[in-house]
Image: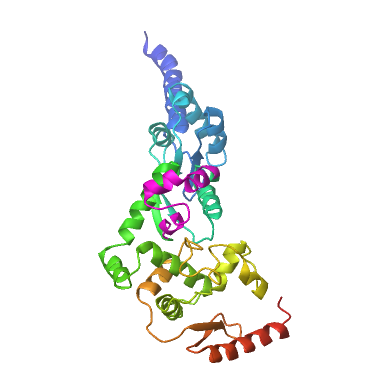
Amino acid sequence: MTKKCKIRYGIPAAVCIIAIIGSFYAFFLSPLSAHEATQYVYIDEDDDIDSVAAKLSPIAKRHSLEGFTTMARHSHYPEYIRTGRYAIEPGERVMTVFRHLRNGIQTPMRLTVPSVRTVSRMAKELGNKLMADSASFEKALTDATVCQELGFDTATVMAMFIPNSYDIYWNISTDNLLKRLKKEYDNFWDSTRKAKANALSLSPIEVSILASIVDEETANDGEKPTIAGLYYNRLQQGMLLQADPTVKYALQQFSLKRIYNSMLNTDNPYNTYRYKGLPPGPIRNPSVAGIDAVLNMQRHNYLYMCAKEDFSGTHNFAATLAEHQQNARRYVQALNERNIK
């Protein structure tokens, strides 16, 4: 072949090779994401290759998405799609993203356990944040056998949910999440906290029940040790706790602004105006501040409390019924003046 022929055929061949290399790079080695910040894709149990591509579409560059789907369709990925929450970093290549999704290399998420009043609400909150749905959480938390295996019953299981943040995988199963939270609960109740509870002749669950009442009484963390001491005094003297939040819980009417005398006769074991001692379980999963307020309660002689008439969210405390009645009259007068029913 003459030199002229070599040049004649060599240039188009070189152009083709460059084009192939360029296409390969554009489709497989270029960054998948079109965004400058980390994006996340959530792969569910019912996803197939088409729905995975649809979830990637708002994130990926068009040619990069074509490269991903090409690799996916020419591999076993459609048959073994792995659930999970996957981070797609800026500059992360198509092949890298594909390898992560194919091999299930997902990114942990930060789950913050909320403080809520009911199992149903807790199940809904978890279902909104994780792959497992709320129905599976509620079914587990209302199952006596499941609760017993965790060391609780259906009334006390809410005490297990310490409102902290935990690193977990989004696709964690209901069973594994509950086991993880039980482990975190056990870690929370270390030897120091257990010793303090024991000194009060209370179990960790009883501390949590009392703390849940304290949390419902005030959002002011500085006042919680005083309130904890008050209710502890009543327990020690064999008095009814007479905690208004337990009446709301018994009625399942959490938005009540006033508690009327007719409500105090509600026949429900959570009604501490009628039943002596602690209720059967917490009236919400207590905050860390609430638990520590009980364990480090203020020692005093208060037996009564009433919300302050200035609606500051704090309370007037009293050691005698007569003093308490004066405080209560001022508060009722303030409610009437503001027409709060």
User: Residue 20 occupies which quadrant of the picture?
Assistant: top left
Please count the marks in the image: 0
Q: Is residue 146 on the magenta stretch?
A: yes
Where residue 4 appears, as percent x and y from the top left, is 41, 14
In the picture shown, does residue 112 fall above or below 62? below
Residue at point 55%, 67% (across, down): 271
Q: Quadrant of the N terminus?
A: top left
Q: Nearer the viewer, residue 247 or 131?
A: 247
User: Residue 7 occupies which quadrant of the picture?
Assistant: top left
Residue at point 65%, 70% (across, down): 263
In the picture, measured across the screen, residue 136 lies left or right of residue 17, that is right
Residue at point 46%, 23% (across, down): 79
In the picture shown, does residue 37 fall above or below 192? above
The residue segment tinted magenta is 135-162
Residue at point 39%, 54% (across, down): 166
Q: Nearer the viewer, residue 337 or 279?
A: 279
Where residue 187 appears, as percent x and y from the top left, is 31, 58
In the picture shown, does residue 337 fall above or below 63? below
Where residue 54 appears, as percent x and y from the top left, is 57, 34
Residue 108 is at least partly visible in this image = no
Residue 116 is at least partly visible in this image = yes
Q: What predominant SS class does the magenta segment belong to?
A: helix
Q: Nearer the viewer, residue 340 or 276?
A: 276
Q: Is residue 331 on the magenta stretch?
A: no
Q: Nearer the viewer, residue 203 or 17?
A: 203
